[in-house]
Image (tube, rainbow, N blue to C red):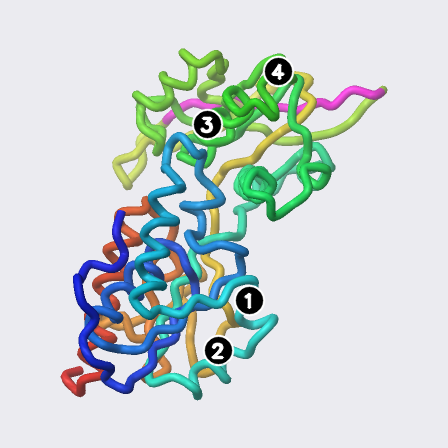
Amino acid sequence: MKFLRCKEIPPSTGKTVSIIGAGPAGLGAAGFLRCRGHEVVVYDMMPEPGGMMMFGIPDDRIPKDNIRKSVRELVEGGARIILNNKVGRDISLEDIIKASDAVLIATGTWKPRRLGAPGEDLPWVLPAADWLVEVHMARYGYLPWAKVPKVGGRILVVGGGLTAADAVHVPLTYPEFKDGVEKVVLSYRRTRDYAPMRKNEFERLIKMGAEAWELTQPIAFYEEGGRKVVKFVRMELKASDSGRPKPVPIEGSEFEAEFDWALLAIGEVPTPPFNNGCCGIELNPDGTIKTDENFMTTRKGVFASGDVRHGPSLIGKALKSGLDAAQKVHLYLTGQL
């Protein structure tokens, strides 16, 4: 993966673009804009660039050295990256907009979606995405291991997407956890045929030793007599207008099982660095940033791309969104938009 795709940087245009978010969309856009001679400043809340590519995905699924090499090339090409700096907390979005000729927001989807079940806030029920980030923060020396929940014993992972797959993979393979694992159960409300992670990945996890509880849904978490209990309901699939079968609870099918930890991987929601309406920028009902066909928000000169614009996606789609948005930013800066 390369972010800077030119051999030489052209003379400066004198225009400055501020990019908020150093994930695939933001870094891809930064490389494109540097190759057009624009000055680029990237802000990111994490201690190292890469976003979820770096901190949310297992090392053996994405080689982190490749990301670091591409980031070095970008910095050597003149991009400035400001880390440990969360826009909206450490610096004002309005101040960034006023100091820039254009702004691109690419802050992704960092907030876990909630299941809405009783007991979801118990200390042994964790958002899988947050836990994966903490694991990798500790692995790379940015967080003490003592602050990372030592997940082990009987582990429940809930979900059917790639975050769920990673939440199964890490305890079973990382040396920091695997010796303490008794079993890992993957609970998914549909069947493997409809899992976003795809059937072959689902079956790979089973071959690794995970148990698959298809057509099940946790509906409550509680403690009783020192036991940590999860209450489930069995599901059945029924036809829907979307073409994808809808999981429906089967009345009277509830059952319980004991676990030591539960990792919830039921999706993430967009995390724009502002509240709806701030700085003249509007959000869509689903929390994504409202843009036109040119990736421009409701504030002139402010653009959005990646998952914060279109919702959770794979790295390739986010990267393409960043590149496409960067082209529009370039046209805007050169008076062609």
Disc 4 packing (10 Å; few <14; some 14–19; many ≥20): few
Q: Camera-side residue: 70 or 295?
A: 70
Residue 60 part of the magenta-drawn span = no
Tell me the element at label 3: loop
Task: Classify the position of the C terminus by image quarter.
Answer: bottom left
User: Percent x, y for residue 174?
Assistant: 53, 25
Image depth: mark 3 or mark 4 in front: 4
Residue pointed to by mark 3: 189
- Image-quadrant location for residue 128: top right
- Image-quadrant location for residue 122: top right
- In three-dimensional space, the C-alpha distance between marks 2 and 4, rounded to whole angstroms, equals 49 Å
Q: Amino acid at mark 1?
A: Asn
Q: Is residue 71 above or below residue 158?
A: below
User: Can you tell which mark lies on residue 85?
Assistant: 1
Residue pointed to by mark 2: 277
- In three-dimensional space, the C-alpha distance between marks 2 and 1, rounded to whole angstroms, equals 22 Å
Q: Is residue 253 above or below residue 82?
A: above
